[in-house]
Image (spheres, rainbow, N blue to C red):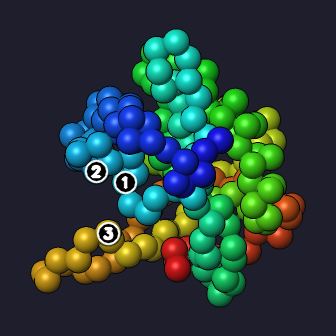
Amino acid sequence: CAGGNELRLADHIELSDFFRKTYGPTGAFNAKPFEGHRSWAGARPELRVIGYDARGVAAHIGALRRFIKVGDVDLLVAELGLYGVRPDLEGLGITHSMRVMYPVLQKLGVPFGFGTVRHALKEHLTRLLARRGLATIISGVSVRSTLPDVYLKLSPTRVEDVLVLVLPIGRPISEWPTGTVIDRN
């Protein structure tokens, strides 16, 4: 587990290469944020869990404490993102990554872990996380956030139709607020 400022230049370069190779096959635009040896896409993670093997970075997941608004309720969460498993290891990493991340999130004192995922991953994540009780997948929710760059002819926010992944950390899933819109504050 690494905090935000514990990575050396060589670490950022290695992670940047890892993300370009991991996200590039899903579309060139997805790899673009990691050009120039940048190891983050939007906000920098507060902490990272990085798995290594003999070939280098094998898996990565980042977390950042933030407030979101679910319906009318402001809620502190650890937002999870920058999840990746090296392509030759796909299918082996997410369950282990979440198990490693869980005690780290408990130390942060957050009630829930929160992340967004594409609909195409629903069955995969259900099989690996939801059925094992590590997370709950919520559909029918839109997530609104401010774009990292502002353009004069475009809205500064985007609304995504995604799946919401919730990990009960300090509170049970029954205490997750209801709402059809989540605002990243």
Q: Is residue 111 left or right of residue 12?
A: right
Mark 1: which secondary structure? loop
| Along the line of sight, the residue nearer the viewer: 72 or 4 | 4
Using the rendered image of the protein, determine whether residue 26 is visible from the camera's viewpoint: no
Q: Residue at x 71, y 43 (%)?
A: 101
Q: CA distance from mark 1 to mark 2?
A: 5 Å
Mark 2: which secondary structure? helix
Q: CA distance from mark 3 to mark 2?
A: 11 Å
Tell me the amino acid under the disc marked 3: Pro
- Whichever of callouts 3 and 1 sits on the residue coming sooner in the sequence is 1
Q: Which residue is mark 2?
A: 33
Using the rendered image of the protein, determine whether residue 41 is visible from the camera's viewpoint: yes
Circle 3 Cα neighbour tier, 10 Å, few/some/many (<14 / 14–19 / ≥20): few
Mark 3: which secondary structure? loop
Looking at the image, residue 18 lies above or below residue 179 = above
Tell me the amino acid under the disc marked 2: Pro
Q: Is residue 49 left or right of residue 34?
A: right
**Residue 28 x, y percent position in the rendering:** 21, 40
Looking at the image, residue 16 lies above or below residue 105 = above
Where is residue 172, by image quadrant? Answer: bottom right
Q: Which mark is residue 41?
A: 1
**Residue 139 x, y percent position in the rendering:** 58, 58
- Whichever of callouts 3 and 2 sits on the residue coming sooner in the sequence is 2
CB under 8 Å between discs 3 and 2: no
| Along the line of sight, the residue nearer the viewer: 8 or 31 | 8
Q: Which residue is mark 3?
A: 148
**Residue 77 x, y percent position in the rendering:** 67, 67
CB under 8 Å between discs 1 and 2: yes
Where is residue 168, by image quadrant? Answer: bottom right
